[in-house]
Image: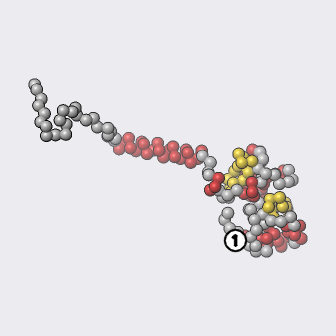
Amino acid sequence: MKLQMSGAGPCVGKPPAVSAMHSFSRRDIVRGFAVLAALSAFAADSLPVAAAEVPLAIKGYDPVAYFTDGKPTQGLPDIEYGWDEHRYRFVSAEHRELFKADPVHYAPQFGNFCAMALSKGEIVVADPENWLISDGKLYVFGKKMGPTLFQQDLAANITKANQNRPILPKD
């Protein structure tokens, strides 16, 4: 049998084209979305949050070191922990684990802000080199004289600073 082709169509003298499109069943599409959802959930859990998105707490100083070493110590960028919308840095994994177990104990009472200034209704970013531990709580101050001034009327200053807490900005 001989086939004749007329010259009136797009397939004149050419073999039929093979379609590059595949047909997918609903089941295939649902499986694909399930795999994508699982991969994106895994990626979200395993990738660190971009540093620019979460502010650094107390300029990168290790809050646990104030208690264990009795001095301010710069933490390491590769040993961090996110808590209360801030990134905390630590000098060791051990310090990070102590913080994780009780962040309320180790974190500065007024975050990145001067406790003395806050007691006066002012907002001043603290210098972590100026600090005080009182009743197991860490306070940081904007100036070297901050801890001394704060201690002159400790109970009243803590009360006033706590009353003024609502004026603190979200970093």
Number of numbered tags placed on the structure image: 1
Does residue 160 show up? no
Quadrant holding the C terminus: bottom right
Left or right side of 164 for 1: left
Judging by the rendered image, the residue that carries numbered circle 1 is 166
State the image coordinates of residue 138 (x, y, percent, origin top left): 81, 60
Q: Considering only vertical position in the picture, is 53 above or below 121?
A: above
- At horizontal 74% and vertical 62% (from top left) the residue drawn is 112
Q: Dividing the picture into quarters, in which one does residue 104 lie? A: bottom right
State the image coordinates of residue 144 (x, y, percent, origin top left): 86, 64
Circle 1 residues within 10 Å: few <14, some 14–19, many ≥20 = few
Q: Dividing the picture into quarters, in which one does residue 111 lie? A: bottom right
State the image coordinates of residue 140 (x, y, percent, origin top left): 80, 62
State the image coordinates of residue 153 (x, y, percent, origin top left): 87, 72
Q: Nearer the viewer, residue 5 or 23?
A: 5
Quadrant holding the N terminus: top left
Q: Dividing the picture into quarters, in which one does residue 57 lie? A: bottom right
Q: Considering only vertical position in the picture, is 90 above or below 135?
A: above
Left or right side of 6 for 159: right
Q: Considering only vertical position in the picture, is 122 above or below 13?
A: below
* Residue type, mark 1 in image: Pro
- At horizontal 53% and vertical 47% (from top left) the residue drawn is 41
- At horizontal 71% and vertical 45% (from top left) the residue drawn is 78
Q: Nearer the viewer, residue 148 or 13?
A: 13
Does residue 106 show up? yes
**What element does badge 1 sit on?**
helix
Coloring basis for residues: secondary structure
Q: Nearer the viewer, residue 7 or 117?
A: 7
Left or right side of 62 for 39: left
Left or right side of 26 for 65: right
- At horizontal 68% and vertical 68% (from top left) the residue drawn is 169
